Amino acid sequence: MSGRRWRQPAAVFGAALALFALTAGGSLTSSDAVTTFALTASLVERHSIAIDAAGGSVDPSPGRDGRLYSRYGIGQSLYNIPFYLAGKAAIRALGRPIGRPDSIPKAAVALGSAVAAAGCVLVVWLLARRLRATPSAAIAAALSAAIASPLWPYSKFGFATALTGLVLLVAAWLLADREPGRQVRSAALAGLVLAFGWLMRHEMAIALVPFGIYLYLAGGPSRWPRVCALVACASVGGLLWAWYNVVRFGHPLAVGYAPEFNGVGYLAFLVSPSGSLLLFAPIAIIWFWGLFAPGASTTAERVLLVGPLVVSYLFYGALADWPGGRSYGPRYLVPALLLLAPGAAMLWPRGLRWRRLIAAAIAAGALLQLPGVLVDYSKVSVDWARTATPDQIAHRTWTLAASPFVLGTQAAWTEVPRNIAYLTGREPLPRVTPSAGDRDFAQQFAFSLDFWWLYLVYLRAFSVPAALILAATLAAAAAACAAIASRESGDRAIG
């Protein structure tokens, strides 16, 4: 494939990566993110899957041999390894750590979510193109996923949300391959991608249901070979997951915890102020509209794009832990939600009125994501919980005042002018002293907007001018790549 044909998708990826790098938080404060990091550190430093729980906010489970193990899949920890190594290399290059000894490696690992999120934006563009969208329409879909969906806040977190979304998008893109000579191979590759996803979150296996149905409905002489290739290759992940469980906990189905079910999430994902799709991702209305517009897509394509969200809703909605801890909106549904984004591309060619509607929806969606981008919800959540009653904490997911959107908006309203005052010299920079405990150290930055380059200013590692120049450079890179992507036009196909 010629370099020119890849210029636009490369620019799409570059714009997303620069934006997400600009707004990255650079910290790990939730227990599952810290636990995943601890497993990465153990894999690299001790070549062991047992973790060290000393000095961190880890959430392990005792294994059959008495040692402690992560309760989460190993896939995210494996993905983190190159970022962890980059963080360690940065410490060696600097000759000293910044903040706590593990602050730089954790920041590098957190940046891995920004890379995965940029990958999601790229694959949304590629998937829209494979589904017959023009380049400009595919850009609209990619932009809507990048800034108008919860992907933007989750590009900052240490959760596996962005990486899981990337797995589902890549698998769907491979399965949508229409080239007869490579369809079976593409289905096998999609299965291997899902096998990796299985090692991140074992419930990823449920995506095989809608993906298999899609292949059946798509028909053709290679229908059953494609189904078999998909399932066989994905099953490799299931076998590795079972072996990993045996090593840790002595049983192929043991994962270190027992989920509880109550079905509350079915309603919560629709109307809860903490997890409503309508509150945190109203852009999904546009996406659905596009997918189900007459003539926009086939029944098989709708199953491919909507099916994973349906099975995710049915599974996660049944969980008692449907909020997923310190989440910004419906965290467990975000990966499957991104598969709907090509719907925006299907509406784009229908005239100026539709384009204006899509642009307005993207702008409104971006405003809804800003509180989660500007402020680390885990910090404002802790602040709220410290003054709340036990009854308020027990019902926080149904309390508007405790909504991540409300708490983030309130905090941003205060912290934006305060941080501007710090950066302009109108107020002296606050001092931060590294302390024991991940959350204790993170709370010392509760006054800061959640940008890694700001944290470096408050740690006195960067001067204010240097930090602002770095931020401006990333913003300019995002704008330049976006301009290149928008200039590239035509109906060249990306197979």
Image: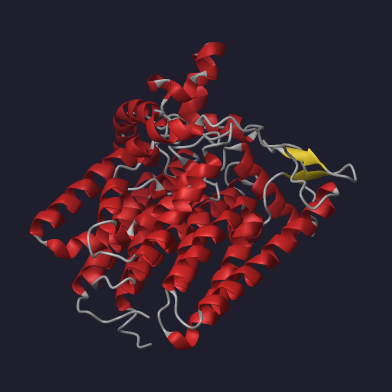
Foreground: 384 or 140?
140
What residue sits 57% from the left and 38% below the top?
A: 29
In this figure, which colouring scheme has been used for the structure? secondary structure
Q: Is 247 above or below relative to 442?
A: below
Q: Is 483 above or below relative to 386?
A: below
Q: Is 406 above or below relative to 250?
A: above
What residue sits 60% from the left and 29% below the top?
A: 440
Q: Is 495 above or below relative to 31?
A: below
Q: Can residue 313 be seen in this view?
A: yes
Residue 405: image quadrant is: top left
Residue 340: image quadrant is: bottom left
**Residue farthest toward the left in the current orientation of the protein:** 352
Quadrant location, the C terminus: bottom left
Instruction: Give x and y (percent) for residue 298.
Output: 33, 66
Foreground: 450 or 455?
450
Q: Is residue 140 visible?
A: no
* Horizontal side of residue 208 vs 132, given as left or right: right
What residue sits 60% from the left and 75% below the top?
A: 229
What residue sits 49% from the left and 64% below the top?
A: 213
* Horizontal side of residue 452 vs 109, given as left or right: left
Instruction: Give x and y (percent) for residue 434.
Output: 60, 35
Foreground: 21 or 158?
158
Count of numbered circles in the view: 0
